[in-house]
Image (tube, rainbow, N blue to C red):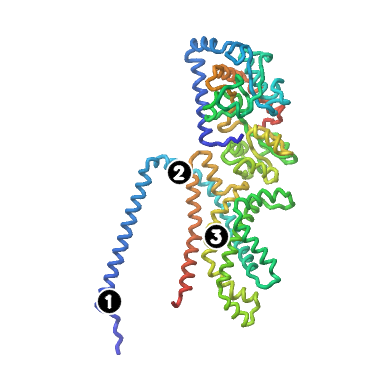
């Protein structure tokens, strides 16, 4: 039998053409409604009676250019502190989550300590922790006290570690107990079962919320400026107070959004991929 | 005490300066004959419409603090404000014997209502809000920025601005102090910036910074009352729009014009500068850095 090239039936061709027309129609409709809404919003803002003053106070192009350099300098501090803090907080969170899920009466004090830690540091406002670390610890006048930047970073790690620990723990507990039972029955020790069976699944499942918390952390690292270092927002504040114009804050805000975009993109991608895998074969 | 460099105070100070600049030529040049006779009438030496005829009643708070006063005794003519008060009295035609001091708390002096003094001298910053309640004379003192540190710090013995350049310094964000730090000292190490002077002070005590910049009155207060081992390194040259101290008079007082003229004369002939150097820099222990 000679192979006949596939030809959709007349009905099917009709159906495809209809679908294409529908697709074009919805794209056009979406573009139109976006344009209408955008124009309306634009007029609403620019026609507001105070727009001219707001424009001067928040969108001063020359001031934006002038303030860009000190703000970028401050942002570099944010980036460095963020990278170190994010990695340390993720490690600390994983450690605490593992400690909280240890079984057996011997480990009660470890579990209790880990629980007390996550309870107290999730409740304690970050600003207070930074004050305690950056102003309290140097006050002890111990030899080799690190710089306030390091101490402020430690405060952020300790606070975010508590949140991330809970995210990890929920991931660990979402792995069905039968998985551990199966691993143990195959002869794996508790540690091996955790390492090779539970944690890989737990981390994968908790990746989206973990990354989400990390994005939030990216904005909070600037709070170390309380202790003296000049971060992007502080640099903007210095310019703002010198000129009584809020444009530097807008510049800093835009830079923060740009900085967060890659991480937000990764988060979305990881979430989508996880959802696809979860639903694979159904 | 905090000199926040906000729009309001800046605007107020500029207005005040503009008012000063605008007033003096009118009084001196534009209508010389009219004002000459008017001032002779309005400000007769030693015979002003004071509370007690022939006497000048000056108010200040009790206790009166160093270095503005000395030994809590305004009558001794020692301390910057006591000296300024007696100089103003002399210009108005009152000998030290004709000056009576009365004790008035800071808040009462700037509250609306009848006053128990002809003028009050108590480190009052001139602000638009206070102008609603009282009259101010021309400023007799423009607040200077000052570096303070703790005993044993490497900048404790600094004699010049150059000695401070390599130190780790701090100041409150958005203040003239921060402006002085970056514009006058121009440190080689990035300065620390704090939300308020209390944080800056804590960092100084902790040794996180080696020195902080505050205004002179705050410097005297911190080193005198708050820090056990605080020392003043010195005053910086004037920068930005400084806070101004003025004599307080009753709202609409007939004396305001005369007292302002007396203060203006003291500034123009250099008396105020001499008093400032004598009582704040030399006796007060806040040497000039250059």
**Is the same chain shared between marks 3 and 1?**
yes
Q: CA distance from mark 3 to mark 2?
A: 29 Å
Q: Earlier in the sequence, mark 1 or mark 2?
A: 1
Farthest left residue in view: A10
Disc 1: which chain? A
**Residue topped by disc 1:** A12
Secondary structure category for the residue under label 1: helix
Dot 3, crowdedness within 10 Å: few (<14), some or many (≥20)?
Answer: many
Q: Is residue B123 visible?
A: yes
* Rendered-image quadrant of the C terminus of chain A: bottom left
Q: How many marks?
A: 3
**Residue A270: x and y, percent?**
49, 67
Res B172 quadrant in image? top right
Residue at point 57%, 49% (across, down): A231
Q: CA distance from mark 1 to mark 2?
A: 57 Å
Compared to B75, does B155 lie above or below? below
Q: CA distance from mark 3 to mark 1?
A: 49 Å
Q: Earlier in the sequence, mark 3 or mark 2?
A: 2
Secondary structure category for the residue under label 3: helix
**Residue topped by disc 2:** A58
**Is the same chain shared between marks 3 and 2?**
yes
**Residue A219: x and y, percent?**
54, 54
Q: Which mark is residue A214?
A: 3
Secondary structure category for the residue under label 2: helix
Q: Earlier in the sequence, mark 3 or mark 1?
A: 1
**Residue A258: x and y, percent?**
48, 55
Residue at point 56%, 67% (across, down): A170
Q: Which is more toward the observer, A6 or A18?
A: A18
């Amino acid at each position: 039998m000679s192979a006949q090239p596939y030809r959709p039936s007349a009905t099917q061709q009709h159906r495809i053409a209809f679908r294409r027309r529908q697709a074009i129609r919805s794209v056009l409709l979406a573009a139109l409604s976006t344009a209408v809404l955008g124009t309306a919003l634009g007029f609403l803002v620019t026609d507001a009676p105070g727009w001219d003053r707001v424009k001067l106070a928040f969108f001063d192009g020359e001031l934006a250019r002038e303030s860009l350099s000190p703000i970028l300098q401050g942002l570099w501090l944010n980036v460095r502190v963020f990278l170190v803090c994010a990695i340390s907080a993720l490690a600390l969170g994983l450690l605490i989550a593992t400690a909280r899920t240890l079984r057996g009466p011997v480990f009660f004090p470890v579990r209790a300590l880990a629980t007390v830690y996550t309870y107290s540091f999730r409740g304690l406002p970050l600003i207070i922790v930074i004050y305690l670390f950056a102003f309290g610890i140097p006050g002890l006048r111990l030899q080799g006290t690190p710089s306030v930047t390091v101490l402020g970073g430690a405060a952020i790690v300790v606070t975010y570690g508590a949140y991330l620990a809970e995210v990890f723990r929920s991931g660990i507990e979402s792995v069905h107990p039968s998985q551990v039972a199966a691993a143990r029955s195959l002869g794996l020790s508790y540690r091996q079962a955790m390492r090779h069976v539970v944690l890989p699944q737990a981390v994968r499942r908790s990746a989206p919320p973990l990354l989400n918390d990390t994005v939030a952390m990216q904005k909070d690292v600037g709070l170390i400026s309380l202790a003296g270092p000049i971060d992007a927002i502080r640099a903007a504040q210095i310019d703002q107070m010198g000129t009584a114009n809020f444009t530097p804050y807008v510049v800093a805000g835009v830079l923060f959004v740009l900085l967060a975009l890659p991480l937000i993109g990764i988060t979305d991608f990881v979430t989508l991929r996880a959802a696809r895998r979860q639903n694979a074969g159904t | 005490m905090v000199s926040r460099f906000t729009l309001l105070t800046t605007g107020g100070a500029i207005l005040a300066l503009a008012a000063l600049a605008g007033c003096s030529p009118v009084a001196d040049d534009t209508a010389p004959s009219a004002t000459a006779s008017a001032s002779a009438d309005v400000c007769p030496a030693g015979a002003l419409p004071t509370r007690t005829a022939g006497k000048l009643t000056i108010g200040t708070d009790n206790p009166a603090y160093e270095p503005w006063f000395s030994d809590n005794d305004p009558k001794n003519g020692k301390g910057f404000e006591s000296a300024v008060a007696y100089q103003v009295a002399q210009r108005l035609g009152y000998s030290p014997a004709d000056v009576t001091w009365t004790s008035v708390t800071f808040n009462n002096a700037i509250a609306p209502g009848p006053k128990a003094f002809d003028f009050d001298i108590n480190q009052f910053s001139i602000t638009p809000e206070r102008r609603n309640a009282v009259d101010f004379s021309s400023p007799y003192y423009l607040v200077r920025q000052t570096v303070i540190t703790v005993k044993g710090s490497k900048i404790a013995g600094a004699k010049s601005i150059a000695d401070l350049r390599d130190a780790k310094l701090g100041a409150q964000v958005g203040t003239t102090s921060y402006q002085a730090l970056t514009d006058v000292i121009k440190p080689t190490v990035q300065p620390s910036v704090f939300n308020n002077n209390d944080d800056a002070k804590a960092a100084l005590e902790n040794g996180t910074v080696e020195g902080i910049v505050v205004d002179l009155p705050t410097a005297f207060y911190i080193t005198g009352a708050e820090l056990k081992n605080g020392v003043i390194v010195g005053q910086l040259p004037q920068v930005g729009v400084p806070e101004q101290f003025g004599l307080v008079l009753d709202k609409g007082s007939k004396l305001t014009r005369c007292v302002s003229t007396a203060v203006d004369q003291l500034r123009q002939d250099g008396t105020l500068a001499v008093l400032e150097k004598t009582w704040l820099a030399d006796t007060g222990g806040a040497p000039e850095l250059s």
